[in-house]
């Protein structure tokens, strides 16, 4: 290759071209596991940087102790506070437009607006003692500041509750919510309709729809109202249009979609302080535009969502819609992320069950009596055995709020079938008498004291009759692994 002639026949290829060829071969080697048809051996053994088995450079998800208050604050802001800000924006912009129409300068028009909105007061939310924001609003810059915070809240809600990329969110247009019936026609699901750009072949992207829980529907409605004036003035249908200046919209306003660096800056420098986002391990947590997608994948992949509190219902809605046989998704990269997090959860649960010093439940007592890892730390031997169980056996482990289900259809007290437990009969009392049930001392809720309402809320998370074995119900991940050479029950390893 080094001696191959370049465009100029009397000269060899340039070093930059050679490096690009080398990078292509390296990438083919690194992607060999996913693309076995084109897999090659290491093209540069001993020369390139060592390839680690774990992912390097994988952008982090937002930790639960940051993600939960972040999303909760965003959900709060898109409710009554968003209505207040929309009313404030309409009042201020109307007065501003009227003043400019009378030939008053923009500076003096701003003073007129300030006088007009001086008496504006904000709502007091239920169970709160004071208005959600202090009055009065003393300048047009403060009006724009509040508008931008509602924009930020809508972005967070969409990113964290559907898992879209930043390019897909800022590409959303008016009228992007559609209603479609479920596969059996028993209910209707809302979908957010947009386009995927990153993995598409063309510049216009590929059409896609995401399951939209009610908060996302609300965020889109808020954005349609907030951006109405910007859309009308620019003639563009985009929802996330922004203005370069920090006041009200003037006749010569520069209107365009925000760049990613601007969104990241606003999330960290304005939105986080505005909602008093807590620190993580004593340090401010740095938000970026991709964390919502990673966190969504992790939340959906979690089978025990007791730590998510109020967010459980939203993710239960999403997983129920994604498992419906009428749902067809094209965001395969997001599916991979969800699978990845679900496997991590399963691995951690297996390690906990195998190494626990005390296990309750009939299956738990059986495991405790037979496990060679009981009371040990999660060392290499235990981790290797967990890998064996996940890759080479038909073990199916489900997690609910009150324990673990080492599922076997022949001993299921809930009368489940090959697809998984019976979602109607799967209750705390049924599990307590079931030969499949195990519970550890670390189990945070359920039989140890969780309210029945919390436990009952997750009953629908198991695969329902009619769902395929490749069910995407990530609450329990009861589907078997594709490689099955022998069963865990009879394993003698």
Image: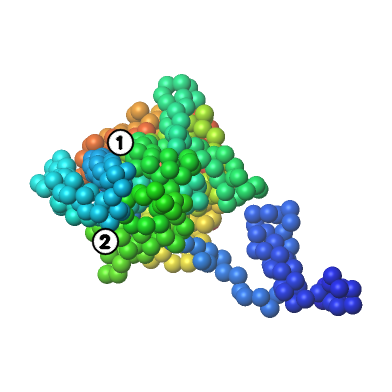
Q: Determine crowd level at label 2: few under 14, some 14-19, many 20+ residues with C-alpha closer than 10 A.
A: few
Q: Which residue is mark 2?
A: 273
Tag on residue 91?
Answer: none
- Foreground pick, 330 / 223: 223
Q: Residue at x 59, y 45 (%)?
A: 205
- Image check: 251 left or right of 385? left
Q: Residue at x 18, y 46 (%)?
A: 116
Q: Is residue 72 visible?
A: no
- Image check: 111 left or right of 57? left
Q: Answer above or below: position of 24 versus 478.
A: below
Among all residues in the image, which is located at the extreme top?
185
Tag on residue 457?
Answer: 1
- Image check: 476 left or right of 201? left
- Image check: 493 left or right of 112? right
The percent coordinates of residue 165 (x first, y second) are 48, 51
Q: Residue at x 52, y 30 (%)?
A: 325
Q: Residue at x 30, y 67 (%)?
A: 284
Residue 27 falls in image quadrant: bottom right
Mark 2 vs mark 1: in front:
2
Q: Determine crowd level at label 1: few under 14, some 14-19, many 20+ residues with C-alpha closer than 10 A.
A: few
The percent coordinates of residue 324 (x first, y second) are 48, 31
- Foreground pick, 23 / 361: 23
Residue 5 falls in image quadrant: bottom right
The percent coordinates of residue 220 (x first, y second) are 39, 39
């Amino acid at each position: 290759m080094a001696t191959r002639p370049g465009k100029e026949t009397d000269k060899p290829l340039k070093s930059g071209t050679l490096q690009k060829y080398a990078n292509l071969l390296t990438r083919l080697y690194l992607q060999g596991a996913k693309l076995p048809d084109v897999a090659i051996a290491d093209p540069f053994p001993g020369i390139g940087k060592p390839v680690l088995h774990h992912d390097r450079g994988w952008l982090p998800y937002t930790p639960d102790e940051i993600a939960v208050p972040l999303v909760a604050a965003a959900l709060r802001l898109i409710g009554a506070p968003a209505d207040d800000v929309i009313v404030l924006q309409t009042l201020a912009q109307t007065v501003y437009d009227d003043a400019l129409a009378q030939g008053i300068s923009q500076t003096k028009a701003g003073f007129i607006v300030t006088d007009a909105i001086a008496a504006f007061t904000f709502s007091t939310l239920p169970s709160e003692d004071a208005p959600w924001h202090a009055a009065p609003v003393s300048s047009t810059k403060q009006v724009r500041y509040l508008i931008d915070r509602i924009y930020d809240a809508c972005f967070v809600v969409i990113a964290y509750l559907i898992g879209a990329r930043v390019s897909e969110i800022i590409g959303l247009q008016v009228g992007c919510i559609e209603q479609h019936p479920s596969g059996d026609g028993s209910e209707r699901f809302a979908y957010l309709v947009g386009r995927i750009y990153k993995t598409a072949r063309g510049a216009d992207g590929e059409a896609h729809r995401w399951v939209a829980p009610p908060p996302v529907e609300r965020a889109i409605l808020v954005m349609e109202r907030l951006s109405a004036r910007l859309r009308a003035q620019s003639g563009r249908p985009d929802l996330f249009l922004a203005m370069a200046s920090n006041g009200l919209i003037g006749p010569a306003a520069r209107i365009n979609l925000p760049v990613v660096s601007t969104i990241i800056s606003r999330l960290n420098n304005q939105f986080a302080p505005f909602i008093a986002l807590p620190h993580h391990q004593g340090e401010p947590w740095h938000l970026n535009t991709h964390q919502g997608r990673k966190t969504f994948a992790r939340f959906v992949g979690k089978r025990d969502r007791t730590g998510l509190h109020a967010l459980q219902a939203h993710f239960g809605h999403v997983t129920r819609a994604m498992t419906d046989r009428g749902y067809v998704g094209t965001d395969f990269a997001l599916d991979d992320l969800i699978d990845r997090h679900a496997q991590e959860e399963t691995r951690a649960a297996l390690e906990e069950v195998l190494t626990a010093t005390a296990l309750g439940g009939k299956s738990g007592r059986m495991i405790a009596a037979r496990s060679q890892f009981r009371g040990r730390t999660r060392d290499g031997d235990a981790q290797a055995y967990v890998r064996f169980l996940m890759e080479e056996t038909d073990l199916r482990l489900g997690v609910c709020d009150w324990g673990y289900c080492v599922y076997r259809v022949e001993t299921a007290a809930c009368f489940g079938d090959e697809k998984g437990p019976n979602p109607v009969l799967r209750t705390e009392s049924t599990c307590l008498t079931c030969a499949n049930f195990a519970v550890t001392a670390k189990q945070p809720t359920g039989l140890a004291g969780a309210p029945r309402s919390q436990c009952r809320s997750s009953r629908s998370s198991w695969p329902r009759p009619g769902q395929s074995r490749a069910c995407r119900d990530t609450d329990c991940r009861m589907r078997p692994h594709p490689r099955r050479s022998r069963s865990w029950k009879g394993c003698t390893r």
